[in-house]
Image (cartoon, grey):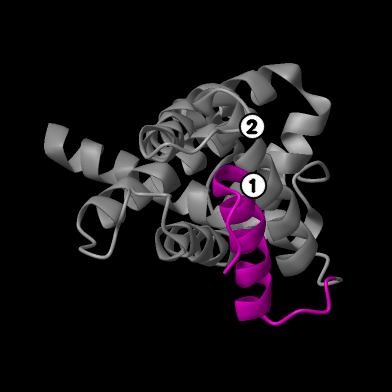
Amino acid sequence: MVSVRKARAAETETALKAAAKEVFAERGYLNTKITDITAAAGRAAGSFYNHFASKEELLQSLLSDLLAAVDDSVQADPEHDPDFTGRSAIRYHVAAYFQFYRTNRTVMVALQQAAMVDKTVAAKLADLTAPDLGHLAEHLEYVRRAGHVLPGEPRPVAQAISALMWGFGHAHLVDANTGLTDDEAVDLVTDLIHHGITGQTR
C-alpha cells in the first residue's frame, strides 16, 4: 500500500511539472496561477501543496531537474573539453548552452520572469546555478595557467560569460531579433568569449 501511494504521489508531481510547463508557455509565468496548473494537470487544487509550497518552489524544482540532466549528459560526452584556450572547446559549450536553452525555453523564460520580480527566486536561482558557474570558472583557470591574462578573476569572468550567453540566448531564441542563424549566433558568442579571454581571433 505504501509503495502504491508513493507511486501515485510521484505521478502527481510529474503531472504538475508537465502541466506547469504547458501553462507557462501559454500564459507566461507571472500570469499563471496555481489553480491553472492543477486544472491543466487534472488534479485537485489542494494536491499541489502536497508537493510544492508555492509556484516558485515548483519552478526551482524544474530548474533542478534540468541542471541534473545537463550534468549527466556533459559528464558522459567524450567531446567535452575543459581547455578554453581552444576555440573549439568554447564553441562546444556555447552550442550546448543554446541547445539547452532552446529545449527548455519555457522554463528559462519563466526563471527570468520570476527572478525579475522576486529577490528570493533570484537568490535561489544563483544558488542552484553556482556549481555550473564554478565549473566554468575552472575552465578559465586553464586559460590563466596557459599564460593568458584574463580580464579579471575566473569567477567574475565566468559570471560575465554566463550573463552574455543568457541574455543573447533570450534575444536570439525567444525574441528572435538577432537576424542570425543558430550557427552564426553560436559563432558570434564563441568569438566574443575566445577573443575576450585569450586575445586571439580565429
Tell me which residue sits at (83%, 28%) in the image.
117
Residue designated by label 2: 151
Q: Which residues are magenta?
A: 178-202
Quadrant including the C terminus: bottom right
| Residue 20 image position (x, y, % from top left) | 60, 50
Q: Amino acid at mark 2?
A: Pro
Tell me which residue sits at (70%, 53%) in the image.
24
| Residue 197 image position (x, y, % from top left) | 57, 44
Circles 2 and 1 in contact, beta carbons < 8 Å: yes
The kind of secondary structure element at disc 2 is loop
Residue designated by label 1: 196
| Residue 76 image position (x, y, % from top left) | 20, 57
Tell me which residue sits at (23%, 51%) in the image.
75
Which class describes the residues within 10 Å of circle 2: few (<14), some (14-19), or many (20+)? few
The image shows residue 182, relative to residue 156, as above or below, that is below
Which is the main secondary structure of the residues drawn in magenta? helix
